[in-house]
Amino acid sequence: ITQLLASYGYVETVEGRRVLTARGASLRRVYGEKDLLTSLCLEDGFLQGLDPASTAAVVSALVYEAKRDELGLLSRYPGHGVEGALMTVLKHWNKLNDAEKLHRLPQTASPDFGMVWPVYKWARGKSLAQAIDSTDLAAGDFVRWTKQVIDSLDQIAHVASSDPQLRTQCEAAINLL
C-alpha cells in the first residue's frame, strides 16, 4: 500500500523513514471505501463549478454501493456539469485500478451512479417518494446512504479548508440534504 501511495505522491522517504506528504496529510482526513479515489478526484477539481445539489449527486457516486455488481452509466445526467464530474471520477477509478493491479492490491470498488438522480432530486426539494421513484431503493436505504453522502461532504469541506468556495459549496449541499 505504501508503494501505491508513494507512486501518487502521498508518501515519501526521508532519511530512511516513510512520511506523509502534504497530499498524504489531506488524504488522512477522508474516510471511506473510496478515500484515495475521492482524494484524487478532489485534486483534479472535479466539483468545481457545480451547484450544491449537483455536488451532492456527484459525491453520492463515491459513497453508494448497490447490492448488484454492475457499472451503470446514466442515459442522462442532472444539473450542469454532473456528467463531466462523473467522467472524471471514472477516469481516476480506471487509473487507480490499474495501479492497484500493478501493486497486487485489492481493487477499489467501482463508482456507482445509482444514487445520483435520487440525491439530486432530494436536494432540489422533491419528496422522498419522488426522489426514489423508478429506483430499487427502499426509503430506509435511501436515508442511510444519504447520511453517508452528508458525512462525505463534511469530510470534503474540511479537507477543502484552503478552498473557501468548495467548503461553502459542500456546506450548502449538506444543508439541502
Image (tube, rainbow, N blue to C red):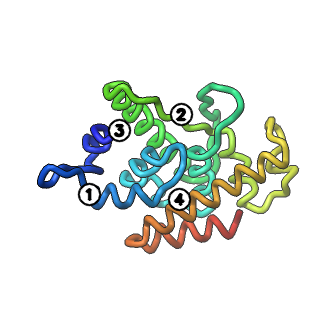
Q: Secondary structure at mark 2?
A: loop
* Position of residue 146 measured from the top left corner of the image (x, y, whole percent): 71, 54
Q: Nearer the viewer, residue 129 or 95?
A: 95
Q: Quadrant of residue 171?
A: bottom right
Residue beneath disc 3:
1
> Disc 4 residue type?
Leu
Most extreme residue toward the left is: 15
> Disc 3 residue type?
Ile
Q: CA distance from mark 1 to mark 2?
A: 25 Å
Residue beneath disc 2:
109
> Disc 1 residue type?
Thr
> Disc 2 residue type?
Ala
Please name the residue shown 82% across and 38% down the image. Answer: 134
Residue beneath disc 4:
50
Q: CA distance from mark 4 to mark 3?
A: 32 Å
Query: How many residues crowd around disc 2 within 10 Å: few (fewer than 14), some, or many (20 or more)?
Result: some
Counting residues from the start of the chain, the first of labels 1 and 3 encountered is 3
Q: CA distance from mark 1 to mark 3?
A: 15 Å
- Count of numbered circles on the image: 4
Please name the residue shown 40% across and 29% down the image. Answer: 105
Counting residues from the start of the chain, the first of labels 4 and 1 encountered is 1
* Position of residue 137 measured from the top left corner of the image (x, y, whole percent): 80, 40
Q: Is the C-beta separation of discs 4 and 1 under 8 Å?
A: no
Mark 3 or 2: the one toward you: 3
Q: CA distance from mark 4 to mark 1?
A: 29 Å
Mark 1 or 2: the one toward you: 1
Query: How many residues crowd around disc 4 within 10 Å: few (fewer than 14), some, or many (20 or more)?
Result: some
Most extreme residue toward the right is: 129
Mark 4 or 3: the one toward you: 3
Q: Secondary structure at mark 3?
A: loop
Q: Secondary structure at mark 4?
A: loop
